């Protein structure tokens, strides 16, 4: 019952005519979306069956990146049909066996009706990306966002043997309020949500040689407590001079290896900042570990400044600080053999930016899936209707009580086109009769 309640809660969000949900969390923050994963992520559930439905959505989102609402609606319908079978005294083992056979047959049918995609066919890729964003409130910017998603995946995709692999974790999504969705842009490099640490440093460096440090540019404190008695001001000056000398030597080391940009994962002392500025080195501190990994621009992250060598430096055509909205950010572009890109999402309102991020995530995911699987199926509930038709034929061949479970699976699959019709304000029964009739006449030809 609890699982079916979860499925019913998000059923109305399915499809291009699906409705949005307004979610208010415990802090009073409002989220407006019809993204299944986002909705279920906000819902607090206690019942084990309901938690299972939330896990279904999370797994779908992690594995595929889209189709979370479809998966939850389908799972809820399968449970509902299973309950009906139990009421008819069908043993759970038979239901499970029938469902497994039906799932295997459904996969065979989808493989058969799948359409091979030429990865150079930008128009088809664009249609796939736009379809994934149909239910998102991004208005006329869908095509623009779709083009960005395709470019981003093309940039990060790499061929391994005879297949393509596209890891969308290599696409960094940065959100900033201001301007419009049409100003969203793809940056062939990495964006650091940081600013240059010292006002005297250059704000733009071309042909950048980048040192990546995972150690502080500071005089480290001793691991044990120590008390030093100073009897003369000159002793204090000597201590300060020694600190300055140590920091100067660190900066000279960076300069000596030829670096003109420094990205540091830890802190940079004020005096070190001063010396870096004097040497004309652009520096950023406290960069995220994930950004540092993306930033390995042909270089290597060094954990001890004494080990820094010229061959450890990365390269980028341009490193520049730019003002985006009210914030300053550092753009690193033109990296050597880049495997990471960034999407800078712009919109006037925070909620619009958040919704655009969800839309971009879905678009990136489905385009990456097309690159990896190289096949698509038609939408609008046509695939589900074809699968249901073939499952009913298959159920007759299987016979016995398992036939009932397979037919129940077919009915559950048809919940998708039925829900699409319902959300579009159409008469479900009439639409399903027309759909079944069309599929019988088409004999497997869906295009």
Image (cartoon, rainbow, N blue to C red):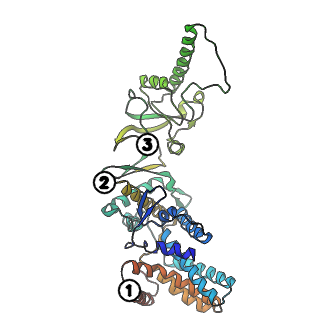
Number of residues whose C-alpha sits closer than 10 Å to that of mark 1, classed few (under 14), some (14–19) or many (20 or more): few
Q: From the viewer's perspective, tell me whether residue 348 is left or right of residue 234.
A: left
Camera-side residue: 4 or 249?
4
Helix, strand or loop at label 2? It is: loop
Residue drawn at 65 percent across, 92 percent down: 400
Task: Check residue 71 in the rendering and tell me which mark sits there, or answer none.
Answer: none
Q: CA distance from mark 3 to mark 2?
A: 20 Å
The first of marks 3 and 1 along the sequence is 3
Of callouts 3 and 2, which one flags the residue occurring earlier in the amino acid sequence? Answer: 2
Q: Secondary structure at mark 1?
A: loop
Q: CA distance from mark 2 to mark 1?
A: 38 Å
Helix, strand or loop for disc 3: loop
Residue on which disc 2 sits: 180
Camera-side mark, 3 or 1: 1
The percent coordinates of residue 425 (x first, y second) are: 36, 80
Q: Is residue 337 left or right of residue 322?
A: right
Q: Residue at x 49, y 24 (%)?
A: 272
Residue 270 placement (x, y as % from top left): 48, 25
Across and down, in percent, residue 216 comes to: 55, 31
Q: Position of residue 40 (x, y in %)?
A: 51, 65
Q: Which residue in the protein does label 3 denote?
A: 193
For label 1, the residue is 427
Residue 381 in view:
no
């Amino acid at each position: 019952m609890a699982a079916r309640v979860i499925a019913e809660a998000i059923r109305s969000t399915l499809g291009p005519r699906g409705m949005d949900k307004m979610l208010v969390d415990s802090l009073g923050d409002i989220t407006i979306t019809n993204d299944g994963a986002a909705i279920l992520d906000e819902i607090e559930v206690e019942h084990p069956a309901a938690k299972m439905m939330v896990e279904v959505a999370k797994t779908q989102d992690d594995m595929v990146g889209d189709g979370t609402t479809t998966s939850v609606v389908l799972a809820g319908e399968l449970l509902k049909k299973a309950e009906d079978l139990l009421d008819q005294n069908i043993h759970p083992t038979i239901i499970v066996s029938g469902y497994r056979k039906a799932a295997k047959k459904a996969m065979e049918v989808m493989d058969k009706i799948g359409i091979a995609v030429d990865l150079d066919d930008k128009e088809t890729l664009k249609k796939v990306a736009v379809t994934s964003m149909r239910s998102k409130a991004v208005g006329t910017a869908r095509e623009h966002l779709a083009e960005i998603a395709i470019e981003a995946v093309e940039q990060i995709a790499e061929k391994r043997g005879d297949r393509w692999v596209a890891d969308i974790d290599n696409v960094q999504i940065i959100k900033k309020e201001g301007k419009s969705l049409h100003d969203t842009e793809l940056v062939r490099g990495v964006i650091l949500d940081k600013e240059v640490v010292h006002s005297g440093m250059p704000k733009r460096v071309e042909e950048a040689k980048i040192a990546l440090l995972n150690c502080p540019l500071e005089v480290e404190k001793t691991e044990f407590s120590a008390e030093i008695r100073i009897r003369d001001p000159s002793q204090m000056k000597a201590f300060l001079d020694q600190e300055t000398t140590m920091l100067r030597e660190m900066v000279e080391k960076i300069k000596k290896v030829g670096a003109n940009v420094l990205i540091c994962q830890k802190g940079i002392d004020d005096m070190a900042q001063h010396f870096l500025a004097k040497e004309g080195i652009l520096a950023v501190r406290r960069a995220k570990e994930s950004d540092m990994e993306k930033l390995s621009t042909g270089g290597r992250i060094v954990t001890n400044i004494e080990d820094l060598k010229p061959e450890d430096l990365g390269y980028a055509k341009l490193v520049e600080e730019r003002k985006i909205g009210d914030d300053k950010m550092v753009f690193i572009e033109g990296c050597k053999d880049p495997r990471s890109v960034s999407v800078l999402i712009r919109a006037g309102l925070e909620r619009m930016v958040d919704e655009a991020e969800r839309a971009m995530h879905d678009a990136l995911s489905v385009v990456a899936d097309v690159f990896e699987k190289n096949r698509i199926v038609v939408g609008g509930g046509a695939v589900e209707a074809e699968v249901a038709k073939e499952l009913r034929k298959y159920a007759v061949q299987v016979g016995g009580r398992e036939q009932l479970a397979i037919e129940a699976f077919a009915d559950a699959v048809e919940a998708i086109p039925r829900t699409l019709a319902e959300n579009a304000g159409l008469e479900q029964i009439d639409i399903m009769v027309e759909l079944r009739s069309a599929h019988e006449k088409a004999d497997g030809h869906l295009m």
